[in-house]
Image (cartoon, rainbow, N blue to C red):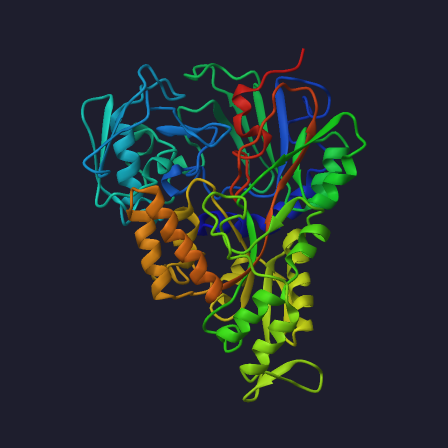
């Protein structure tokens, strides 16, 4: 989970709940299309709101930003395809130089031409130390970026960074519109201009964002002319508004999505993901910092029961950031549900049951606090299930909810029901989640996990250009994490979307944890065609 995305949730969590009730009586798109069969408008209900609409501060960094395009994009199979680039990059110098030839004739929505200077401006600004982009470390491999004329951009890397091309789905902003203002607080953050298929027409914070089709889009003007992103934090309210016809589609947790099963006017679309749920085990806490406790919790949780009961089968047991169905998953690192062995580990480490069944060691009670973000029912259910399993092993977990502003300062000592996941490359999850250099750096490495062997393998994985060598490195990371758990991973969650029927060839991508407007069935809404 990135700091930027989490802070966006944190900043708007309460506003989203209040706004949901306030606007429930009127369609967020102004009553023109939602639930009424219109095929030129779409109103979707989402739980999260972006903090900014500027890619310079992290918006849309993983693609599908709607307002912008990157040099490359990902298709339905998550394969890289040209976008603002005319073709895939030419890679030379043993993986240290990437040369992009740009698509000709592309214009920003204000009519100004797109050139290589805009690409250079975008990347240089993000990397500037004055720019408050929490994800800038993802571009650490860049040594310099230069323009060779108007239609060629060259990236020189400090070292061969295998997944660099995946990073170039990052949206490009126009130098003429964003330069000359404070990058962190300027007007571009809320009134952006891009080359993408849609143009922002309004943003009511905590309520909705509205967009119109870009008639000059290089990929062709979208059939869906008006797009509305309704911010509805509460799952129940989102389901109610979908049922009432106030929304055309929404993301819903499994228990609410199944309520639409008999509605023939609706379709439910399932997206596979790398979106995990897990519990951070802070190393500074006297209980969770004990290796025996961490190993015992890994064995005490019944992951399969969580998948069946909490996810209604829409997901998989999770043993780390990498899902079990990924080519990058290290076979053999699955941990069994073995409460008997968990108890034995605790006994051997000196954690003995007290009078009330909760274990103690040297006067320290085996208990800790576990936080989850208020309003997130799926995380709440995971937290309660984890606490129940832990108690059976003699460990007391007190579950509390709060905003991210409340939770973040407590992460050093308290556990958090965390989420994360990015399908593009294992480096994107594993490095930020586990590398010791990023301990408590925003929402990176929230457990302050530190393992020298894991650090070394993470470096090997991101710097090698050979897939076999990278697989070996990431296997080493996952085995190290199984031996020294910094988190108790629980599940990988499928995303369920319920939407009005009537569109051709609806697809989803393998989705990351962040599931805003750029994910779901509407990841490629600009290409949608109505059924005849």
Residue 321 x %, y %: 49, 52
- The extreme bottom residue here reads 362
Q: Is residue 396 visible?
A: no
Q: Residue furthest right?
A: 262
How far across and down, in percent of the image, does residue 11 sit? 53, 50
Q: Could you tell whether 439 is left or right of 292 in the image?
A: left
Decide which of 368, 339 is in the foreground and name it: 339
Q: As displayed, is residue 528 above or below residue 249? A: above
Q: Is residue 396 above or below residue 496?
A: below
Taking depth in this image into account, of 340 and 320 the one nearest to the observer is 340
Relative side of 329 to 266, left or right: left
The answer to whether any part of residue 174 appears in the image is yes
Q: How many labels does the image show?
A: 0
Q: In which quarter of the image is the C terminus?
A: top right
Place residue 28 in its image quadrant.
Answer: top right
In the displayed structure image, the side of residue 125 where residue 483 appears, left or right: right
The structure residue drawn at horizontal position 35% and vertical position 44%, both measured from the top left corner, is: 468
Horizontally, residue 236 falls left or right of residue 164, namely right
Toward which corner of the image does residue 340 lie, by quadrant?
A: bottom right
Residue 202 in percent (x, y) is at: 53, 30
Residue positioned most to the front: 332
């Amino acid at each position: 989970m990135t700091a930027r995305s989490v802070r966006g949730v944190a900043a708007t969590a309460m506003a989203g709940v209040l706004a949901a009730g306030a606007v429930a009586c009127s369609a967020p798109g102004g009553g023109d299309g939602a639930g009424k069969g219109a095929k030129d408008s779409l109103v979707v209900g989402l739980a999260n709101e972006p903090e900014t609409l500027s890619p310079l501060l992290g918006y849309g960094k993983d693609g599908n930003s709607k307002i912008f395009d990157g040099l490359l994009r990902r298709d339905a199979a998550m394969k890289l395809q040209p976008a603002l680039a005319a073709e895939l990059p030419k890679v030379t110098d043993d993986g240290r130089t990437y040369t992009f030839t740009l698509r000709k004739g592309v214009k920003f929505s204000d009519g100004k031409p797109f050139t290589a200077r805009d690409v250079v401006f975008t990347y240089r600004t993000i990397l500037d130390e004055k720019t408050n982009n929490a994800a800038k470390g993802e571009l650490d491999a860049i040594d310099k970026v230069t323009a060779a004329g108007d239609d060629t951009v060259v990236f020189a890397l400090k070292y061969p960074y295998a997944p660099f091309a995946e990073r170039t789905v990052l949206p490009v902003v126009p130098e003429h519109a964003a330069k000359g203002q404070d990058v962190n607080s300027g007007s571009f953050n809320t009134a952006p201009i891009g080359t993408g298929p849609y143009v922002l027409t309004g943003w009511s914070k905590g309520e909705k964002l509205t967009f119109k089709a870009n008639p000059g889009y290089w990929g062709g003007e979208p059939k869906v002319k008006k797009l509305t992103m309704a911010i509805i934090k509460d799952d129940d309210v989102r389901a109610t508004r979908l049922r009432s016809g106030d929304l055309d589609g929404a993301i819903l947790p499994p228990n609410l999505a199944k309520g639409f099963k008999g509605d023939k006017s609706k379709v439910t679309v399932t997206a596979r993901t790398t979106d995990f749920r897990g519990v951070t085990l802070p190393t500074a806490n006297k209980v969770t910092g004990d290796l025996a406790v961490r190993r015992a919790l890994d064995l005490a949780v019944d992951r399969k029961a969580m998948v069946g009961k909490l996810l209604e089968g829409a997901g998989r047991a999770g043993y780390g950031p990498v899902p079990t169905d990924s080519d990058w998953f290290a076979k053999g690192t699955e941990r069994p549900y073995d409460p008997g062995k968990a108890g034995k580990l605790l006994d051997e480490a000196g954690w003995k049951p007290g009078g009330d069944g909760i274990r103690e060691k040297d006067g320290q009670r085996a208990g800790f606090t576990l936080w989850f973000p208020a309003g997130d029912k799926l995380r709440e259910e995971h937290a309660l299930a984890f606490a129940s399993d832990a108690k059976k092993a003699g460990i007391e977990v007190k579950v509390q909810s709060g905003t991210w502003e409340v939770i973040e300062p407590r992460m050093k000592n308290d556990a958090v029901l965390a989420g994360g996941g990015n399908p593009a490359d294992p480096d994107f999850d594993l490095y930020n989640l586990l590398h010791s250099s990023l301990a408590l750096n925003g929402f990176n490495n929230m457990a302050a996990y530190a393992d020298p062997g894991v650090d070394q393998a993470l470096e090997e994985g991101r710097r090698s250009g050979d897939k076999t060598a990278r697989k070996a490195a990431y296997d080493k990371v996952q085995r190290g994490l199984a031996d020294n758990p910094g988190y108790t991973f629980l599940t990988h969650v499928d995303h369920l979307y319920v939407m009005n029927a009537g569109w051709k060839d609806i697809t989803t991508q393998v989705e990351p944890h962040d599931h805003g407007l750029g994910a779901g069935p509407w990841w490629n809404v600009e290409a949608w065609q109505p059924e005849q």
